[in-house]
Image (tube, grey):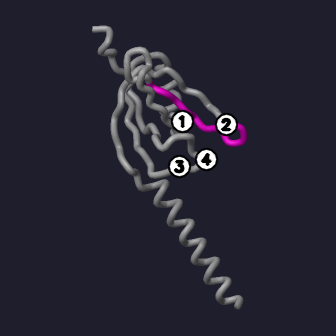
Amino acid sequence: MKKILSYTLLGLTIFLAAYFAFVYYVPYSEGIRSGELIKISRKGMLIKTWEGEISQGISGAQIFSFSVLKDDVIAKLKEYQGAYVKVTYIERYRTFFWLGDTKYFITGVEKESSPHLN
């Protein structure tokens, strides 16, 4: 009986570790989006995560919501608040509550010139 229980616990532990590794390390998609950075905030009750939004259309008709993990990217986003930016992101299959609210995670950010002001 102890042997069956220990094998069951070992199998469950291996399954959970493999699931976590798959969700965290295997991206569903990668891409680039651009728009006006309208929000960057740290939110959550017990575990704080950095969340942001980019307006991709005139009058904010299309909003791209994202999460951020890297401190250097967070600093750049704070600096570019209100500016037109281009962000590089990865999309994960799922997320965990301690990583962020969305499946989109920003990996890089650059300041761009707005196409609306030309």
**Residue 79 image position (x, y, % from top left):** 50, 20
Magenta range: 44-54
Q: Residue at left 60%, top 71%?
A: 13
Q: Residues within 10 Å of mark 2 (few under 14, many from 20)?
A: some
**Cβ–Cβ under 8 Å for marks 2 and 3:** no
Q: Secondary structure at mark 1?
A: helix
Front residue of this view, candidates 64 and 79: 64
Give the Cα distance between marks 2 and 1: 17 Å
What is the quadrant of the N terminus in the image? bottom right
Residue 71 badge: 1
- The numbered mark, 4 or 2, whose residue comes first in the sequence reads 2
Residue at 57% x, 66% y: name it. Answer: 16
Tag 2 residue: 44
Spatial CA distance of label 4 from label 3 is 7 Å
Residue 47 in magenta?
yes
How far is mark 4 from mark 1, CA to CA? Answer: 18 Å
Q: Categorize mark 4 by other alpha carbons within 10 Å: few (<14), some (14-19), many (20+).
A: few
In primary-sequence order, the first of circles 1 and 3 is 1
Give the labeled residue for mark 3.
95
Q: Reply above or below: 55 against 106.
A: above
Which mark is first along the chain, 1 or 4? 1
The three-letter code of the residue at mark 4 reads Phe
- What secondary structure is found at the residue carrying circle 2? loop
Marks 2/3: CA distance?
15 Å
Q: Residues within 10 Å of mark 1 (few under 14, many from 20)?
A: few
Image x and y of residue 20, in percent: 53, 60
Callouts 4 and 3 close, C-beta under 8 Å: yes
**Left/right of residue 62 with respect to residue 5 in the rendered view:** left
Q: Amino acid at mark 1?
A: Asp
Task: First in sequence, mark 2 or 1: give its number.
Answer: 2
- Residue 25: give x, y in percent of width and height: 45, 55
Q: Where is mark 4, residue-wise?
A: 97
